[in-house]
Image: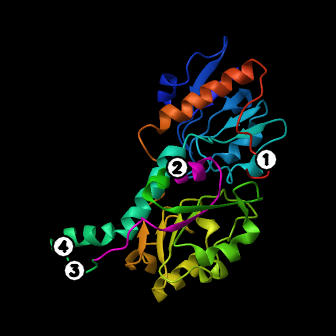
Amino acid sequence: MKIWTAHPESVRYLGDLPAGAELAFLTAPGAPLPGDPAEVEFWVPPFLSGGSVTGLMPEMTSLRVIQLLSAGADAWAPHVPPGATLHDARGVHDSPTAEWVLAAILSSLRRFDHYARAQADRRWSIGEVTPTDEVAGKRVLIVGAGSIGTAVARRLEPFEVSLTYVARTARPGVHAVEELPRLLPEADVVVVIVPLTDGTRGLVDKDFLAAMPDGALLVNAARGPVASTDAITAEAAAGRLWFAVDVTDPEPLPADHPLWTMPNVLITPHVAGSVRGLMRRAYTLAGDQIRRYAAGEPLVNEVSGGY
């Protein structure tokens, strides 16, 4: 079995490979191919930033498994060839993304972004934004009740907040997405952590934001196209809502875009999952998947319908 992964350091975390397995590395879009793609059976491709490797798949006639390093599979799902299955890295990004959401909420409400700018100006800015808001007592609506949404909730629970959950379909303790118009007006903080699918593209639009109460905070740790950039820009310019986003549409956000300089917008460059432990967690999962595949056992995290 020929296996390609995206990182030479993956050998540290994959564990014991099946007998006869041959490992090679395609490290980035556009990098020289390490062999004949028609012979690859199990592929852990590079991230898509900086280019695309999805165009290789028609040449990968022996491909049976695509194991992603990312939690999102939207860029890959349309390109999976017949006979192959697509698997995301569900679980790998729970902790770092949940930490980012918590940090974004705290930084926005306690105005760390303002103080960072004041520090760069060497300005002691007491009184300019104080007293700040606080997390305690906030009503938090988590849109996306999957593994990352659950990890976010666990980290928020000690902060004396009330939590409400929304998912694609209702289940005990979780509301359906159709209930958002009723739930949004009651939320002080809205965390969006859904996959990008046909059903979630443009979910956060003008009407979604208009339903949020004055002074509420929207946190987008999903994908840029889940939210309308024009709608966010209009609300941010009006000063009615606050925003913390790790993703934008387009991405990267153009340097001359007005969101960069708005005082009620916190932007990070799609780094919520970029932590030192990523490779260890991702390739431990990939190694487990390789062994399951070789043993003829069912694989986990198969993507179906964008989820």
Circle 4 residue = 121
Residue at x 74%, y 40% (from the top left corner) = 302
The numbered disc on residue 304 is 1
Residue at x 69%, y 76% (from the top left corner) = 182
Of tags 3 and 1, which is closer to the observer?
A: 3
Mark 1 is surrounded, within 10 Å at the Cα level, by few (under 14), some (14 to 19) or many (20 or more) other residues, namely: few
Which residue is farthest top?
A: 19
The first of marks 2 and 1 along the sequence is 2
Q: Residue 132: x percent and y percent?
A: 32, 74
The first of marks 3 and 4 along the sequence is 4
Left-right relation of 232 to 119: right
Which residue is farthest bottom?
A: 238
The first of marks 3 and 2 along the sequence is 3
User: Disc 3 vs disc 4: Cβ atoms closer than 8 Å?
Assistant: no
Residue 77 counted in the magenta span = no
Q: CA distance from mark 3 to mark 4?
A: 16 Å
Q: Looking at the image, which is closer to me, 205 or 87?
A: 205
Q: Looking at the image, which is closer to me, 73 or 53?
A: 73
What secondary structure is marked by label 4?
loop
Q: CA distance from mark 3 to mark 2?
A: 33 Å
Residue range of the region highlighted in magenta in the rendering: 131-154
Circle 2 residue = 154
What amino acid is found at the position of numbered circle 2 in the picture?
Answer: Arg
The first of marks 1 and 4 along the sequence is 4
